[in-house]
Image (cartoon, rainbow, N blue to C red):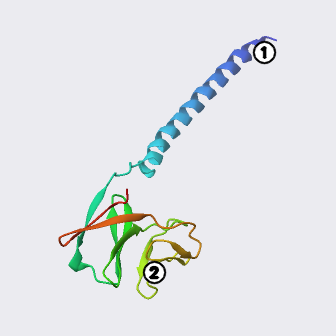
Amino acid sequence: MNKEILTQPEQSKRNFLKIILSGGLVALVGSILYPIFTFLKPPKQGEVEVSSVKVGKLKDIEKNSGTIVKFGTKPVLLVRTETGDLRAFSATCTHLDCTVQYRKDFGMIWCACHNGKYDLNGRNVSGPPPRPLNEYKVVVQGDNIFVSKNV
């Protein structure tokens, strides 16, 4: 009976030390892994609010062509038709957010991901896109081209 009394305090000391050492080990592993995971996860970046951008010179954009320009953090497709009209649309497909492009051979805006097609008014013509492209306003001042939100 004497041995049982002596082993119980020793047993509780052992359990206490196991808990303390286990907690210290967990804290050590956490203090090593936390900085690694926070470094690997990119910080959230707020969206840049842009209302208008200068695209370039009118003489630099050929007829029957399209070019992608940056509008803040988003891509915009600027299309110059065969007649010389300028149109701008969101360059992000409404299906799965792929980047669209102007195809001379189709005379349309085309999404390579799932063969979605839009006409030169931004309306979805064929393929899986569920809705038209967002349109932007194009303004020509002198020889400079500006694209702005269609408000």
Which quarter of the image is occupied by the C terminus? Answer: bottom left
Q: Amino acid at mark 1?
A: Glu
Q: Which residue is mark 2?
A: 108
As measured in the structure, the alpha-carbon distance from the residue carrying label 1 to the one carrying label 2 is: 89 Å
- N-terminal label among 1 and 2: 1
Any mark on residue 4, and which? 1
> Is 95 placed above or below 59 here?
above
Residue 135 falls in which quadrant of the image?
A: bottom left
- Left or right: residue 53 compared with residue 117: left
- Left or right: residue 136 compared with residue 52: right
Which is in the foreground here, disc 1 or disc 2? Answer: 2
- In this orientation, which residue lies closer to the viewer: 2 or 32? 32
Q: Residue at x 78, y 11 (%)?
A: 2
The residue positioned farthest toward the left in the image shown: 142
Q: Position of residue 23 (x, y in %)?
A: 57, 30
Q: Residue at x 82, y 12 (%)?
A: 1
- In this orientation, which residue lies closer to the viewer: 85 or 47? 85
For label 1, the crowd category at 10 Å Cα-Cα, with few meaning under 14, some 14 to 19 and many 20 or more, is few
